[in-house]
Structure formats: C-alpha cells, structure tokens
Amino acid sequence: MVFLAYIEQTPLEIRFWAKVQFDSSLPEVAHLGRCWVWTAAKSSDGYGSFGVRCGARWSMIGAHRVAFFLFNGYWPDTLDHLCRLRSCVRPSHLEAVSRRENTMRSPIARAAVQSRRTHCPNGHLYDLVDDGRRRCRRCRNEKARAAYRTRRSS
C-alpha cells in the first residue's frame, strides 16, 4: 500500500521518464537520432507498458503512446515506430498513421509482403484484373489450356 501511495503522489511525467534509458550505446537512426529505450515492463510482443490510473483502477498503456501524448498532447489511433525498435519511446521516432499505412510499412506483415510482390511464383509479371486482384495471366492461361486438353482427351 505504501508503494501505491507513492505512485499516486508522483507526477506521471517523473514516473514515466525514470523508466527510459538515454544512452549513447543505443541504436541510432540516420536522420532521427538515438533511440530512447523503455526499461520497465514490456508486453509479450516487446512494446513497453506503463501503468496509469483511470478512475479507481489501474490500466496498462503502451509506453510509446504515453511518450507521444506527453510531447504532442493527443492520442492517435495508431503509431508507427520509424526506427522499427518496439521498445523505443522517443517521440521523434513515432508517427501517427492509419492502421492500413502502419501495416503496409511493416517489413514482416503478410499483407505488406504480398503487396510488394511483382512476380508470380513461376517468375511471370503479375497483371491487374477487373476485380482488383493481382493474377498472372500467363499461368492462368496455361492452367486453362491444360484443363481443356484433359477434358478433350477423355
């Protein structure tokens, strides 16, 4: 109980910045500067977690979201880590974007990886079709010819 009383009396900014590592040994992003790494609790996927009081109960919020709020004064729907380090809380490394844009910027998201592909698995260039889906016209034609030959021979 003594610990909770201390937390409630300590300003949010002081509690927050005490958990951030500002060190010259941290990774540096070319035009953005060095990362500020969250050293306290982290979620299972590597994002920093910060406890805040909401009425009578405590909630865990993403530390990068709190840092963005402290510097910019608003809560965006989605934040993109420009440095790609999930535990980074430096506001200049965070950008408010739409969910779709955040997904498409990802180097590992399946939708982003698929959208960057320009050739089918057989090496042919994808063609745009009326319904907006990418398909390889050459592979589709070869498959249709094979099916036609099979039907014709039986």
Image (spheres, rainbow, N blue to C red):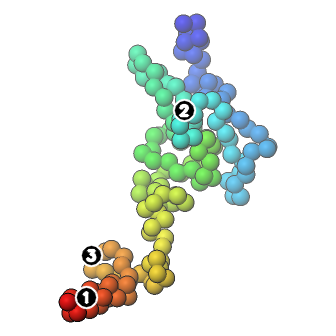
Q: How many numbered badges does the structure rendering display?
A: 3
Mark 2 highlights which residue?
Answer: 49
Q: Which numbered marker is on residue 131?
A: 3
Residue visible at 32% across and 84% down in the picture: 143
Residue visible at 68% across and 45% down in the picture: 35
Residue density around tag 2, few if under 14, some if 14–19, many if 20 or more, within 10 Å: many
Q: Are marks 1 and 3 in contact (CB under 8 Å)?
A: no
For residue 109, above or below residue 14:
below
Label 1 residue SS: helix
Relative side of 58 to 107, left or right: left
- Quadrant containing the C terminus is bottom left
Q: Residue furthest front?
A: 154
Q: Earlier in the sequence, mark 2 or mark 1?
A: 2
Amino acid carrying mark 2 in the image: Ser
Amino acid carrying mark 3 in the image: Asp
User: Where does residue 112 sit, x and y in percent of width and height?
Assistant: 47, 63
